[in-house]
Amino acid sequence: MNKFMTVVTNKWFRFAVSILGVAYSVVLAYFDYIVFFYDIEYVSQKEFAILGSVFSALICLLFLYTRRSPLTCIFGMVNMVLFFPLLLLDWGNWPLLLPAAVVTLFGFFCCHMNETAKTIFGTIFLLMYILGGIAFFLIMNVFRVTTVDTLIEQGVSPSGAFRYYVLDVQNKSTGKKCVYVQPNTLDLDKGFIKLDTTIKKLVKQAPKPCEFECQWSGTKMIIDGEVYFDEANALAEQDGQLVYDIDDGSWIYTYFSIEYPLFNTIEDVKSKLGKLSDKLDEENTVSEADSSEETADNDSEMTEDTSETAESSDDEAAQTDENEADSTDEADTEQSEE
């Protein structure tokens, strides 16, 4: 018993055990990634809640035992940062958020840290959560059109590579109907939870009242007799296998998207500024070319003037020489006569 207590109370043993705390940070980072690219669907919410509670209790005991370890202090602060995007992006998913919040707060407050440093970091994290949360929810609720989406119809392509679904979108106006296409094989099944991909592409929308007749014909998706999507254009062969080729910019990759006229206006202004900048660059290029031509013309004119001046000087010199020669001849003639 004494040997056991000696080992358990040894600081190096605690330091080694504290390394296990990285498991919780990895789990938080993993769920941060999930909520960006997947919708979480519970196969058995009760099983998930039980497993999550047991895992959270074990991690709390681990943090309590290793609270004097420097690694536990570091993990406590890192977890406060990692929990922030999970809280914002998956708000309302209480079976996941409540255990995670308890473990994160417990790990931060139980770690053996200087009280002044803990107060400073605690204030920073508090401001981050309050101000960041307010800013996020303002953006999501003010700069985004709030809608109520109802699934009307869905269907999988014959190859099983893609699926479509039709949404009835209720907004502040008359509403609309939208048809989206999604990859059908990117969903993940983790046993007690299913992760549904949020990658999608809008292929058609129209204001209500309207009706869509959607069907697959081979690799093509036909809406009201017209082809709106061909899965052959979104698949590529790699290492002998077909993989998704959806990097053309028309696919949405996150579960939330900001759709508001303000952002469209910003994009239009950026586009116009870019065109204006290109136009000014072209004008500057033309002006520089014209200036170069004018400079070349001026140089040519100066060269011609210099040549003419030189010729005039030569003519004057020649005339002067002739006059001097005539004067000399006249003088010689006069001397001869005398």
Image (tube, grey):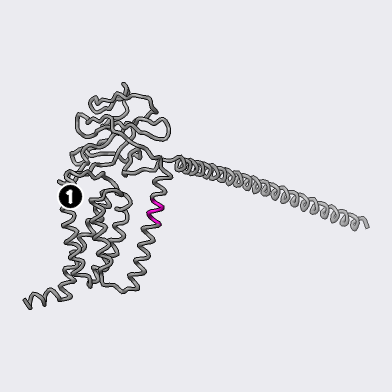
On the image, the x and y values in percent for residue 276 come to 53, 42
Question: Residue 181, percent across and down?
Answer: 29, 34
Write down the residue under mark 1.
Answer: 48
Q: Residue 73 appears at what percent x and percent y?
A: 26, 68
- Residue 4 belongs to magenta span: no
Q: What range of the chain is rendered magenta?
A: 131-136
Residue lying furthest left: 1
Q: Quadrant of the C terminus?
A: bottom right
In this view, the residue farthest toward the right is 338
- Classify 29 as above or below 75: above
Residue 133 within the magenta-colored segment of the rendering: yes
Residue sitting nearer the eye, 329 or 208: 208
Q: Residue furthest top?
A: 225
201 horizontally vs 265: left or right:
left
Rendered location of residue 299, percent (x, y): 64, 49
Residue at 27% over, 36% down: 182
* Occupied quadrant, residue 290: top right
Circle 1: element type: helix
Which residue shows up at 32% across the image and 49% down it?
A: 89
Which SS does the magenta portion mostly show? Answer: helix
24 lies left or right of 270: left
Amino acid of disc 1: Phe
Instruction: Answer few, some or many: residues within 10 Å of disc 1's Cα (few below 14, many 20 plus, some between 14 and 19).
Output: some
Quadrant where the image shows the N terminus: bottom left
Along the horizontal axis of the image, is 198 left or right of 294? left
